Amino acid sequence: MDSTARSAPVIEVKHLRKRFAGNIALEDVSLTVGEGEIFGFIGPNGAGKTTTIRILATLLEPTAGQVRISGLCVQNDTEEVRRIIGYMPDQYGLYDGLTVEEYLEFFAGAYRIPPRLRRSTLGDVMDLTDLGPLRRRMVSSLSRGMKQRLCLAKTLIHDPRLLILDEPAAALDPRARIELRMLLKELRRMGKTIFISSHILTELSDICTSVGIIEKGRLIECGSIDQIKQRSTKKARVEIHLHEPRPEAIDILKLSPEVERCSLDGKRLSFDYLGRPEDFHRVLKLLVDNRIPLLSVAQDTRNLEHLFMELTKGDVQ
Ligand SMILES: Nc1ncnc2c1ncn2[C@@H]1O[C@H](COP(=O)(O)OP(=O)(O)OP(=O)(O)O)[C@@H](O)[C@H]1O
Ligand SMILES: [Mg+2]
């Protein structure tokens, strides 16, 4: 690979558009993923995640726009791009009649790993994915989580620089999800760049260095989680614990133009505050002046899921 390809972003998508028989699946999607990032591609069902991923993986032609992987064009430099990427589809078939080791040996051959390197390559990927103890098991006897690890091991055999994983956590139990997260962090430490899609947000927020949020074919937010939070947290959700239930607190708060979506659940008073942080004490003063006894005040620290719901207006299909 020449130095231009090395210094280019690992993924560069510009004005990507995809139309299927009159239906627009992607509209003007642009994003960049730098070396060593874990990029979370988040969106509800039908948003366009798999369509984008299949274009990145050279399996689908875009209707318009450009996609470069390490500076190479996915449409013109297909073979080179395929050598750089490891793609794990959302649905995959495995050959049931083989053992784990035979299955991986088959793909080592398909990827043209030289015979003298095959044993060590297979040993490395089985160590990484914890498949060593299962090497002689028949693929048909593996659990879903084990099969998924096997598919990931297959994806790693040719030592790809970029991993493109379409909903790898779907259908995994909580423990297998934690193991997957640890594995992805380990792969990042090894220098891989990872593009991973999900509609389950909380599991990505602690491993991703940046995220893109897609809805109805449009990328509606992109950047680090902190950047997105900053842009979308002009509002703060506030929760006040009262000493006793006081329904009139709602009418009192409505006097403030900076308060929205106010509700009272027992002694828990919640609302959105839209004003400047330094003016927040005025809202509290309003309550105190009206003899509403307050026990505690907390601001909601938003997680990605909360943010996503706001960004997509809860419009999850
Ligand atoms: N081969 C196809 N032919 C026609 N329409 C398609 C095709 N593939 C995808 N679409 C449409 O494109 C849109 C995006 O689908 P896509 O599979 O990319 O969504 P997704 O975000 O991966 O959803 P999910 O979370 O369900 O996997 C949908 O409206 C879908 O119906
Ligand atoms: Mg999909």
Image: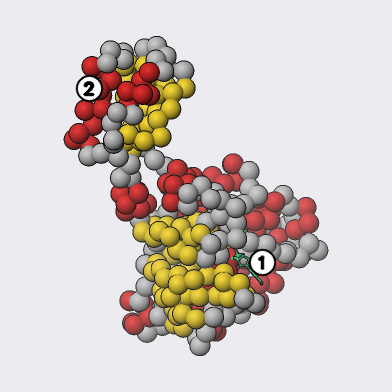
Residue depicted at x 41% and y 68%: 31
Above or below: residue 25 compared with residue 61: above
Residue that protrudes farthest toward the left in the picture: 278
State the separation of the CA atoms marked 1 and 2. 67 Å
Q: What residue is disc 2 on?
A: 285
Q: Amino acid at mark 2?
A: Lys
Q: Is residue 133 visible?
A: no
User: Residue 172 in the image: x percent, y percent?
Assistant: 63, 48
Q: What residue is disc 1 on?
A: 104
Instruction: Name the colouring of the figure.
Output: secondary structure
User: Residue 212 in the image: x percent, y percent?
Assistant: 43, 60
User: Residue 290 in the image: x percent, y percent?
Assistant: 27, 16
Residue 178 position by quadrant: top right
Point out the tag, 1 or 2, that comes first from the N-terminus: 1
Residue that protrudes farthest toward the right in the picture: 97
- Does the CB distance between marks 1 and 2 fall below 8 Å? no
Q: Identify the mark at residue 307; answer none if there is no mark.
A: none
What element does badge 2 sit on?
A: helix
Residue depicted at x 28% and y 12%: 291
